[in-house]
Amino acid sequence: MNGKNLVLIRFSAIFAVIGAMLGAHMAGSGSYAFRPIHAHILVVGWLTLFAWGVYYQVFEIKTKKLAVWHTWTAIIGSTGLTIGMWMTFLQPFNISKGISLVFYIGGGVTLLVSFILFVITTFFIEKK
């Protein structure tokens, strides 16, 4: 395994644990306030990062910098989006809407950039 896919796999595992813990919390408490955050953590954080980690294991990207940019925008975007959703929807610690929106929108835009970079990487691949 190279660095890109190992980092993505490790972050996906962290997101999987957090998502499972949120699911267990919702089931135990009977409150579904975390539902959108839980869903995004599992779909974007766990499944997408894992799939991209496998992608980098199967294919060699000719443009290494593109793969590095894709990896880090994926991690930063997934993290920012889910933290921003949590701060916007649940308003913990009395955080201002402005700060929560910076995380929410900034994370979402960064994640969108990551998806676009992923599409671009598919034009610069070689099967390992």
Image (cartoon, rainbow, N blue to C red):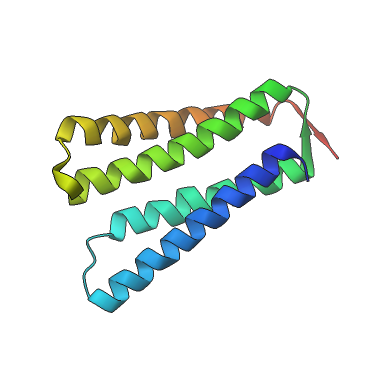
Q: Nearer the viewer, residue 62 or 85?
A: 85
The answer to whether residue 95 is left or right of residue 28 is left
Q: Is residue 3 at all visible to an observer of this figure?
A: yes
Q: Residue at x 24, y 44 (%)?
A: 87
Looking at the picture, how far across and down is residue 125, in whole percent? 76, 31
Of the pair 77 and 91, the residue shown nearer to us: 91
Q: Position of residue 18 (x, y in %)?
A: 43, 59
- 39 or 106, nearer to the observer: 106
Residue at position x 40%, y 67% from top?
Answer: 21
76 to the left or right of 64:
left
Residue 3 % position (x, y): 72, 38
Q: Is residue 58 above or below residue 47?
A: above
Q: Report the side of 32 relative to 118 (left or right).
A: left
How many marks on residues? Answer: 0
Q: Which quarter shows the C terminus?
A: top right
Vertical placement of residue 111 versus 88, above or below: above
Q: Residue 64 appears in which quarter of the rendering?
A: top right
| Residue 100: % across, % down | 23, 36
Q: Is residue 52 visible?
A: no
| Residue at the limit of the structure toward the right, as seen here | 128
Q: In which quarter of the view is residue 88 placed?
A: top left
**Left/right of residue 116 with respect to residue 2 in the rendered view:** left
* Residue appearing at x 19%, y 49% in the figure: 92
Identify whether 97 is placed above or below 26.
Answer: above
* Residue farthest to the bottom, as pictured: 28
